[in-house]
Image (cartoon, coloured by chain):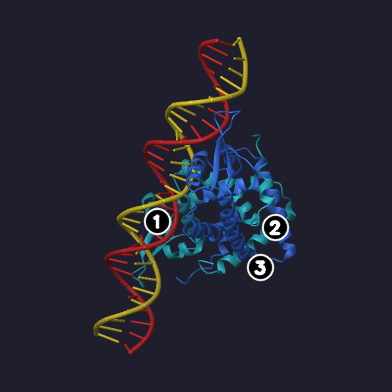
Chain colours: A cyan, B blue, C red, D yellow
Amino acid sequence: MDAPDPETIFDEIAFRDAYRMSYLINAIIVPTYDQVRRDFGVIRAEYHLLMCLAHYPTLSAQDVSRITRRPRNSISRAVHRMLAEGYLDRSPDPSDGRQALLTITPEGRALHEQIAARLAERQEVVLSPLDADERVQLDGLLRRLARHVADLPDEG
Amino acid sequence: MDAPDPETIFDEIAFRDAYRMSYLINAIIVPTYDQVRRDFGVIRAEYHLLMCLAHYPTLSAQDVSRITRRPRNSISRAVHRMLAEGYLDRSPDPSDGRQALLTITPEGRALHEQIAARLAERQEVVLSPLDADERVQLDGLLRRLARHVADLPDEG
DNA sequence: CGACATTTGTTCCGAGTGGAACTACTTTCC
DNA sequence: GGAAAGTAGTTCCACTCGGAACAAATGTCG
């Protein structure tokens, strides 16, 4: 069978926007994470951890879990690996013995910047068909949706 | 630490659109697939297979791989499971002994409709902040981006 | 026709994933 | 104060995932 057009299928499904986003992510972001893993030895959960810590001076693992909406055990593993690699520091919280305070190191920050550049570059490839106005439109729509989803309970 | 606003971080990263899409997908679509797995015993690759076959009368596994941009071995596993469950039929292609022609069964189509309804319902939860005009905007933008990505080579 | 490259589908295997159970600590409430 | 409930972090385990190597069939080109 001659290759069917992979795009037409999207038009006929009810959840086409969700599927298109998933498609865009799988085609572009996931390969970039694979490349980052090969080049830097850092997996997605580990990079998410760096990203969060690059934007807040101090976070607990639980904070990172809430921000990224990813399970705690993935964060826990990432924390241990990034500690071993010297990309972050951990100190017990004196006011709450259950949690530990995480801080990014300069090495971690430098790594974060390299990885962020890769992701930004790849995003540019995806968004290249859009002009400046359209990008503002998309950005505004996605921002509102992300804000909305952030306010939803865990299992909508 | 009192929970930081999980949304503000997005504004400060260069690849915010990609991250927001990934965030939306992880918060909404992924949980829905988990729910579908629990309720119907069908994982994502298997549902993708059903979805493709629901829209084309006949496809090879390779066609499905190209449409979904997912690796062939995942499709292969999905084909075997869905054959065993009676959700699709397979017959050798008389004109090419390498490939087999896949067709969805009525049972498979019925299952597809149930799962699609779940996904559509969940998409509605995500998109609920947008009015009709904004949805048309988003749809148009995502359509163009998906079309663009479909034309890109595999590893950007 | 015969050697070589391609393509389809499969199996193998190492790695990542997240639910569930667990420990340690804290808060709540009587 | 003490029992019960809740929370942070970890470990365990079954499952999914996708790259790589593979067999079988086809295509290419001398």
The residue at 52%/39% (across/down) is B72
Query: Share a chain, discs 1 and 3?
Result: no
Graded by Cα atoms within 10 Å as few (under 14), some (14 to 19) or many (20 or more), the crowding at tag 3 reads some
Mark 2 chain: B
Mark 1 chain: A
CA separation in Å, label 2 and label 1: 37 Å
Q: Given the image, on which type of amino acid does mark 2 rest?
A: Leu
**Residue on which the image places disc 2:** B138
Tell me residue D14's x, y (percent).
36, 52
- Name the image quarter holding the N terminus of chain B: bottom left
Task: Label 1: state its secondary structure.
Answer: helix
Tell me residue A69's x, y (percent).
49, 62
Verify CB contact (< 8 Å) between mark 2 and mark 1. no
Query: Share a chain, discs 2 and 1?
Result: no
In the figure, is residue B130 to the left or right of A29? right
Pick whichever of labels 2 and 3 is earlier in the sequence. 3
Q: State whether residue B12 appears in this view.
A: no
Tell me residue B116's x, y (percent).
60, 57
**Residue on which the image places disc 1:** A79
Q: Given the image, on which type of amino acid does mark 3 rest?
A: Pro
Graded by Cα atoms within 10 Å as few (under 14), some (14 to 19) or many (20 or more), the crowding at tag 2 reads some
From the viewer's side, name the closer residue of B127 and B11.
Answer: B127
Tell me residue A74's x, y (percent).
42, 56
Task: Label 2: state its secondary structure.
Answer: helix
Query: Share a chain, discs 2 and 3?
Result: yes
Nearer the observer, disc 1 or disc 3?
3
**Residue on which the image places disc 3:** B129
From the viewer's side, name the closer residue of B106 and A50.
Answer: B106
The residue at 40%/56% (across/down) is A79
The residue at 52%/48% (across/down) is B46
